Amino acid sequence: MVESVYKGQANALLSQIRAHQERVDLIRSDAPVQRTEPGSESGFVQYVQEAVESVNATTQESAALRDAYERGEDVPLTHVVLAMQKSSLAFEATLQVRNKLMKAYEEIKNMPV
């Protein structure tokens, strides 16, 4: 049973990695930029919003598992540690993306016109 749980978690993580890679490939592609009406969210803004919401959900799931373990519920410690590591990794990746975006913004802002 434990082995099937780990396989399921590994498959879920692998599918998330594949979905992220597809998004990265889409961003890197030479697809034309689509202009949208002000106030409508699509494209890059929507992608960033979904990514932040996903990181938030991962963090909340990790906190819920940790709290359940601390209350003495029947939650394996390995699940708690795995969820906390997944949450930490997601947050760290989001932080690195933010840093890259800020650096790109600064470079564009300092370009001579």
Image (cartoon, helix red, strand yellow):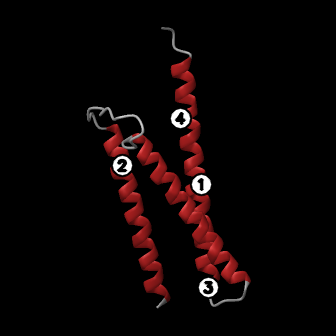
Find out whether the residues at labels 4 and 1 contact each other: C-beta distance under 8 Å: no
Helix, strand or loop at mark 1: helix
Give the residue drawn at x 52%, y 52%.
52
Give the Cα separation between the discs numbered 1 and 3: 23 Å
* Residue that badge 2 annotates: 23
**x, y (%) of residue 65?**
62, 77
- Residue in front for this viewpoint, 54 or 9: 54
Label 2 crowd bin: few (<14), some (14–19), many (20+), radius 10 Å: few
* Residue that badge 3 annotates: 76
Which tag, 4 or 3, sits closer to the chain's start? 3
Q: Quadrant location of residue 68?
A: bottom right
Name the amino acid type tagged 3.
Pro
Name the amino acid type tagged 2.
Arg
- Residue in front for this viewpoint, 43 or 96: 43
Give the Cα separation between the discs numbered 4 and 1: 15 Å
Label 3 crowd bin: few (<14), some (14–19), many (20+), radius 10 Å: few
Give the residue drawn at x 42%, y 78%.
8
Q: Nearer the viewer, mark 4 or mark 3?
A: 4
Give the Cα separation between the discs numbered 4 and 3: 38 Å
Give the Cα separation between the discs numbered 2 and 3: 33 Å
